[in-house]
Image (cartoon, rainbow, N blue to C red):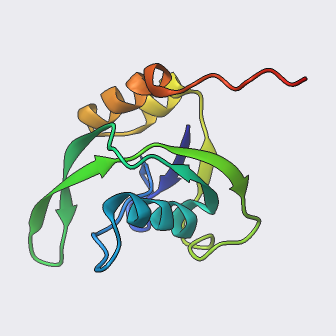
Amino acid sequence: MLLVTSRETKRWLIPKGWPMKGKKPHKAAAQEAEEEAGVKGEIGNTPLGHYDYWKRRAAHFDLCRVKVYPLEVSKQLKSWREKGQRKAQWFEVEEAAHQVLEPALAELIRSLPAHVQPAAPAE
């Protein structure tokens, strides 16, 4: 499981972003994964679920809902848009669940193995 740090608080989370005009939500999620974590791959078009979090603004907080789409990573870039602003790190599923603050995100992470197809054996 790949996590990235937030730019301001440096806490661990998944790549995420705002809706993009003219892009389907799962395509926007794939773009955010590339920009924030430097990964490309096959994105699912159905969310695994969602979680809510409080987004810090200058003078207040906004409640945001994040839909989580699965991305099967096929390529990890050496350089990407936000590389100097965030850390990206691979974790085992249970460790990733312990690293994030939002309980609903931790549960989604723990549910990942049930959604992942095992790789076909090499011939």
Give coordinates of residue 23: x percent, y percent: 35, 72
Identify the residue at the far front of this view: 123
Give 87 or 73, whichever is nearer the viewer. 73
Give 6 or 78, whichever is nearer the viewer. 78
Give coordinates of residue 95: x percent, y percent: 52, 27
Quarter of the image with the N terminus is top right
Q: Is residue 60 left or right of residue 67?
A: left
Give coordinates of residue 57: x percent, y percent: 18, 73
Relative vertical location of residue 40 with respect to residue 22 in this rendering, above or below:
above
Q: Which of the 4 image quarters holds residue 78?
A: bottom right
Q: Is residue 6 left or right of residue 35?
A: left
Name which residue lies at 80% across and 20% down.
121
Give coordinates of residue 96: x percent, y percent: 49, 33
How many dots with numbers? 0
Name which residue lies at 57% across and 60% down.
37
Q: Is residue 6 left or right of residue 53?
A: right
Identify the residue at the far right of this view: 123
Name which residue lies at 42% across and 63% down.
27
Quarter of the image with the C terminus is top right
Q: Is residue 106 left or right of residue 82?
A: left
Relative vertical location of residue 9 with respect to residue 98 in this rendering, above or below:
below
Name which residue lies at 32% across and 43% down.
47
Relative vertical location of residue 77 with respect to residue 3 in this rendering, above or below:
below
Relative vertical location of residue 79 with respect to residue 105 in this rendering, above or below:
below
